[in-house]
Amino acid sequence: MPSEVDAVQLRGIGKRFPGVVANHDVDVTIRPGTVHALIGENGAGKSTLMKILYGVQRPDDGTITIEGKQVVLKSPTEAIEAGVGMVFQHFMLADNLTVLENMVLGAEKLHGIGDGARTEIRRISERFGFDLDPDVLVEKLGVAARQRLEIAKVLYRGARIIILDEPTAVLVPQEVDALFENLRELKAAGNSVLFISHKLDEVLAIADDITVMRRGTTVGTADPATATKHELAELMVGSELPSPETEESTVTDTVQLSLSDVTLTDEFGRNLLTDLSLTIRRGEVLGIAGVEGNGQAELVETIMGMRIPTSGRIMLGDQDVTHWHTRQLREAGIGYIPEDRHRHGLLLDAPLWENRILGHQTRPPSSKGMWINRKGARKDTERIVADYDVRAPGIDTPSRALSGGNQQKLIVGREMSGDPVLLIASHPTRGVDVGAQAAIWDHIKRARRNGLAVLLVSADLDELIGLSDTIQVILRGRFVGTFDPSSVTPQDLGTAMTGGAA
Amino acid sequence: MSAATAQRSTIVERLTKSWLYIGLIGIGVVSFVRIITDTDDLTGAGTIRAAIIATCPILAAALGGLWAERAGVVNIGLEGQMILGTWGAAFFTYHYGPWVGILGAALLGLVGGLLHAIATVTFGVDHIVSGVAINLIGAGAATYLAEAVFPEYEGGGPRQLNGLEAPAQVTIPGVSDLANTISDQHWFFVSDVASVIQALTTNISTLSLLIFALVIISALVLWRTSFGLRLRSCGENPQAAETLGVNVYLYKYVAVLISGALAGIGGGFLALVASSGFSTGQTGGRGYIGLAAMIFGNWRPGGLLAGALTFGYTDSLRLRDTQSVHSLLLLVAIGLLMFAAWRACRKQVKGALVVAAAGALVMAWFLLTDSVPREFTVMTPYVTTMFVLALGSQRLRMPAADGKSYRRGSAG
Amino acid sequence: MNGRLKSVGLALLAPAIAIVLSILVTTLVIAAVGSSPGEFWSTMFEVPKPRLRVDIVNQTAMIYIAAVAAAIGFRMGLFNIGLEGQYTIASFSAATFAGAAYLGGFANVAASLVVAMVVGAAWAGIAGVLRATRGVSEVISTIMLNAIAVTLVGYFLNNYGVKEGNSVHTKNLPSGTTLGGWSPFEDRDGDIWALAIVAVLVGVGFWALLNKTRFGFDLRASGQSESAALASGINPKRMIVISMMLSGAVAGLIWMPALFGGARNYGTSFQVGLGFLGIAVALLGRNRPIGMLFGALLFAFLSVKSNDLTFGTDVSPSIVQITQGVAVLAVVVTYEVVRRWRTRLEQRAVSRELTATTGATA
């Protein structure tokens, strides 16, 4: 071997959790001084792999070689010692501590916890243009600054290999550009970066090498200089590349949901949603596109009555439901597939049939008057399990034990029951396997043909284009563009989503 | 660089200054009330002495709470650990003298803390549930052990052990006398300060001094050392701490053990200094008041000291004549009205009105009556805590991951 | 069928381990102070005398009511540590009301029970409202309310109670409104109090409420996942206040069997500590109606039977407090361990099922 020793070699990595094989036969090689992109769909096993490389979890099989030395990483401390640092997708910061405290935590021996550390932080901050003040509380920092702090934390520990897990998910385009600038600086200083993403444009823009993961294993590598987005996408999802096909329009003239000038203000008087107006007709799917955190969650929660708009009006059919509570809205026939099924969609420790009741407590077949109808609920759960192909040992199994796809199919089945007039679907296929994804798309399409009105929020632009009749783009709580899915490209949407000319 | 250092020192200065001002204003108001109502007992050296004795066990428990909660473990088992401490102090003092006795109190409290740590940290049991169980065990164990062991001791019985040697007391001769002279003049402000100095320099228990010192030591260790930083990070974001190589379980264990030991020392104080010996049920809920003082103090050492002093002071007045308790009403009324004015200045109109109304009520109570039932002073710490929680819950800042169960490997 | 048997076995495993552990610890403690554990256990396990048997039933009833009160909060994810204060102030109010004899005969009893429930509910409601509107932790506020309740009752009793020698109590019940009981043995062995039946009603009511009604479902859902409950249309604030008040109302009933059975007034005969015992039993019985029944019986047995220790052994009766405390701590720990183990088993079962049906690896 020449003087260039690979920064990281992962060979045959495997990791099993009870009931799931998260990683198997994973091979990745990172050349020194490069940005190496690891791409794959949600649930492809990227995060597990990263946690293994950072010592948070231990692999069941395989070897890790860092800068030519085979290592066993039992904890993050050992990974840090080996020169590996990680920036998690969900920032690992304590809000109530200062920048300095967050920075030196766990690495107090390097520069102390006082002025020595302060000087070092300023040095790193100036060197890479991070603009960090050591004595500010982290809660006062914005998202981009927090991310810079996370990267600085890694550098402070002398890491030469830096893992970034989906770093752009929370950033606006300018911030992404700034981040890439930072990454180039890091590269120039001789560091290696492992960049995890499923955003192909970004990957092609920054990466020197690309490794693709699918279903827990590495399925190939690509050269960003020659690879196209389509090739990468096919590698990511396998040969089938399922994509929802648009069907002929079933849009009717009956307006099912209309929002007029809905504004939502938070406790500090900032607008989360500003003057949103939309209409959804029966048989219509309205897609909402946007970079995460631009008001999608607030919009859904406002329609669902979990937040009450500060001003504006919401009509369901010809009823004013602006001030209705969630239960009334559900009783009026709104089905709700929440974004985070573990937090909002399921009682994880309750059996499937009780989860069938959740959100439908007041309606048959779940209840009769004041009473829970156990028999009815169980029977209907059997129906959902059969019709929606929920793979489970039985309806007495706690929902926690199901895989993500099966949990989601159960939720879809539940929310489609009782003839809803409107379905609010928030990221309905996030984190589910390809099979479940196709099934869920089919269910939404069938319901649409039967006259259901659907509000579809998704980060998956292909999904939006394939399912929607109209797409609205949301940016910082405002609608910034309306598109016709039959003519729009993901690139157009991307531009609008990031505030480019619509 | 120098600019930032300068900025930092001004923050420190500002904080110290504001505490100083609040302290000075406080003494001024108390002095004013003392003169108006002609109750010299309000700040008599005797009262202050009693207040210090009443404060110490609450303070020790509050510190115990601080250690545990800063590491993210809610410890309502403080009461049980304190009870264990009373027994430990009695047993070890009887055999080996007061200082070993205090160590014994700490040891027994630590055992209670260990139980809590095993349940909450290792097994992830709900912190409140474990705390309740530990209070049951602590009370049961102290009662049983007392009945089993103490009757055979000299001065002992199934429910008490008297005649224990107390830790030494110290007096600083010159200062003490001078302060005494000034205090007797009953001058505005000066005499009140002198009373405090007199109480602090005359026959003060070394254990009291130790407990006050522990406040400063805790503050320094928790906020000025890397050990403290790591410990606090476990209470703010244990996942983050783990990803940075902090052994979260270890720090939580250490924090809860120290917490138990501090509560135990508080119990020891009750048995050795606050009364003439051990008796069953001696803590009387002081572990809970300690917890309240810590919340009152917003999970900060200075704040909990203020809380413990407030509760200790009212507690001590209860033991003295009812006249001074009645004067306390005026003090509370003035305090509330001042607080209302401060809120009004900050444009918190609604809050200001509520507080002002409360102040007016208390004022009316003061003007229309001549005495206050003893029971109402007993209630003071509890009612105060409820008010602080109800009015200030938005301003209170507990550690972000306080009371949450944490499992290793859950990061990311 | 096999699966069902297995799950019952798993459910019993935790309490079994806990009981073994508490027996072990108790034995060790007794041996450590130089007494004889053998003597202790043989005394404890003797068949209780008739008088004690009656006592055990009466104590079981009161502890069970307290346990149900605690369980209502627990199932909702609320820690009503304030049972002690709620039943103290409720018992005092009911005793005062009953003693005033506004009504005669059974009407007085019924009205007093209502007073007890209303006062208990109101006192618990303070904590509920503070939690719902101001976000104040109910743990802290109920601890504070406990102390306030006890002091407040002390104040009223001292100032308005009937003084008798060194003690004070509320006015005695009018003669027509004490309830007899059922005497299964000789008269001198005492009565099983008539209002012990309240425990049965409360238990059945709790079971039905939780498993059969929509409200019960909402309550359990809120306890399992506040966020999922909110998304399903449950109003969390309303649930907090209602379940807190419900818990307080049941707590108000805790001491009523004794008041109308033998005590006749609120005074020195008032039994403190039932609230905390109730919390312990709720934890021991996993908030399940049947589980708590066994727990209450066990605790009542230990408490009552320990009186025998004063004769014949040199072990003091307070040893059972250690047994009880250790049992609670051990049971919550073993439940947690069993729960984790069970989750793993279930996930394995599901993955087996999947491989069997699809033949895939994952």
Image (tube, rainbow, N blue to C red):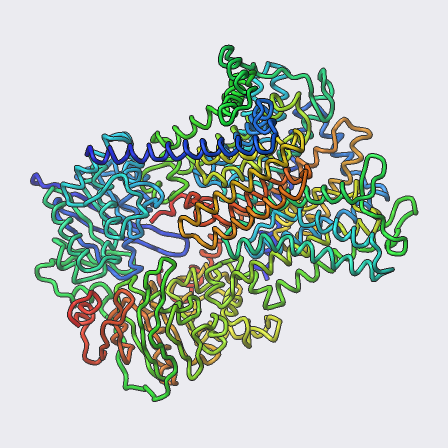
Residue B148 place in picture, x, y as percent: 71, 25
Q: Quick check: B51 above or below A344?
A: above
Residue positioned 57% across, 31% down in the render: B34
Q: Quick check: B165 above or below C97?
A: above
Q: Nearer the viewer, residue A444 or C2?
A: A444
- Quadrant in which the N terminus of chain B appears: top left
Q: Quick check: C240 above or below C282?
A: below
Determine the residue located farthest toward the right in the rendered image.
C187
Q: Is residue A489 visible?
A: yes
Left or right placement of residue C229 versus residue B381 in this view: left
Left or right placement of residue A167 versus residue B284 in this view: left
Residue A476 place in picture, x, y as percent: 27, 64
Left or right placement of residue B216 versus residue B268 in this view: left
Residue A218 place in picture, x, y as percent: 23, 56
Left or right placement of residue B314 versus residue A16 in this view: right
Task: Name the quadrant containing residue C140.
Answer: top right
Q: Quick check: C67 above or below A452?
A: above
Residue C25 place in picture, x, y as percent: 63, 33
Determine the residue located farthest toward the bottom in the rendered image.
A253
Residue positioned 49% across, 58% down in the render: C225
Q: Is residue C25 visible?
A: no
Task: Name the quadrant containing residue B162.
Answer: top right
Q: Nearer the viewer, residue A485 or C86?
A: C86
